Image (cartoon, grey):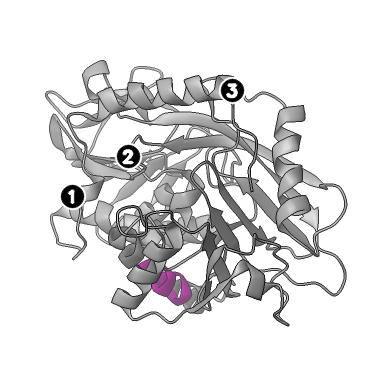
Amino acid sequence: MAKKPDLIIVGAGGIHGSAAAARLSKEFNVVGFEQFERGTDKGSSGGWERMSRLATGEGMNYAVGARFSQEKILDLQAATGRELLRITGGIDSSPPSRDPVNDPSWVQTVKGIRRELGLPFEETNGHDLKKRKENFNLNLPDDTEIVIESDMGIISTAAREVNLSIAEANGAQFYFNTRVAGLDYEHRTAVIMEDGQRIDASKIVCIGGNWLNDLLDEKNKLPIINEQRFLAYYPILENHGAVPYVYYTKEHIIYGMPSWKGGLFKTGDSNHLREVISPGAGLTPPGDADYAVTDRIPRELMTGIGGQAVDFMKGRYSITPRGDFIIDLHPDNPDIVLESACSGHGFKHFPFVAEIVHELATGEPSGFELSRFRIRSNDRAALQQQISLIQGKKKDRLPLRL
């Protein structure tokens, strides 16, 4: 190692690790470790593209973060000359709620957030959408509530490499294919390498989903659920367009977006088959049940998307019982930051999450509300309940009901 680090990032090779390195290397001598190769497709930063939305139904915390992130990604694009974000417009949609007052639909929540933030939108429904001249290519049920949002788009996963390059220009050093085995946090702030070597630093930032708990002792393990999920790419028919969309029901979160490379449309169900796996387990090959879920989406929800899927991806997906990110200090050492920003859903938030990590590492206020991202004492119990619920439902998994 060429120089002693001020700050170590464990899990530096993903989008959030690279973003943290780019942000923190302005002020710290950063060393980053990544257990996989540079540009790995393991974890949640592979593939070609992710969706960008400003007003997500998860709440105002995320909407404020998404807006900040989109602005920062556009700044990054302008500064580097690399195309990282395409604003395409898109659609949020959901069935109408039976009890709008006490149980608002996804679209009602999105509309409320957009109104509060002063973001424009257009309301319509599934019936009227089919009559429009624009190529939305969606065949949603007639009573579907729909919000058309001009600021939706797609983000290139090349943002990860751009962040790494910025950090390196700031003097950061990265060690790929180098696994950190644990943390020494009781009497010092250090990472423990596989050969037993301890490397000290003033601050440590640990970032990850599936593998983050490998670094933590039993009493401090985070409430992270690991699943394997599946998505597919279908050809877009000639003279047809397509925009990003989300169709949010009680049982399914169906989404799709144009491929960054063009000509294909990526789609999947965020709930898919709810296959819980251990962090170190290998992924099983796609089976008939996987294909059945993805093939029904273009067949029943879309027009202009034709033929057989031409590419498939099966990957790891990490979530928490509350569905929120975890961004907090280690319970036993305030010089260690723990971050799990929850898979592909978190990709669009990488500048926002990096800003929170910077606040926790430096003590400088970011201006963001952090309470939703804190570790809670009852999260571990909620984790077991959620896993039991998922596994119980999986036995008689509901078919895709559109």
The residue labelled by disc 1 is 371
Asked if one can make out residue 279 in the rendered structure from this viewpoint, the answer is no
In whole angstroms, how far apart are the C-alphas of marks 3 and 1?
36 Å
Q: Where is residue 73 in the image (x, y as percent from the top left)?
A: 45, 70
Q: Which residue is drawn at 14% across and 60% down?
A: 364
Q: What residue type is labelled 2?
A: Arg
Q: Where is residue 277 in the image (x, y as percent from the top left)?
A: 52, 22
The stretch in magenta equals: 68-75
In whole angstroms, how far apart are the C-alphas of marks 3 and 2?
23 Å
Q: Residues within 10 Å of mark 2 (few under 14, many from 20)?
A: some
| Left or right for 95, reference 328 | right
Q: Which amino acid does label 3 sit on?
A: Asp
Q: Which amino acid does label 1 sit on?
A: Ser
Q: Residues within 10 Å of mark 3 (few under 14, many from 20)?
A: few
| Left or right for 249, reference 371 | right
| Left or right for 113, reference 266 | left
Q: Is 131 situated above or below 275? A: below
The residue labelled by disc 2 is 322
- Of mark 3 and mark 2, the one earlier in the sequence is 2
Camera-nearest label, 1 or 2: 2
Q: Residue at x 49, y 21 (%)?
A: 391
Q: Which is more toward the observer, 293 or 155? A: 293
Dot 2: element:
loop
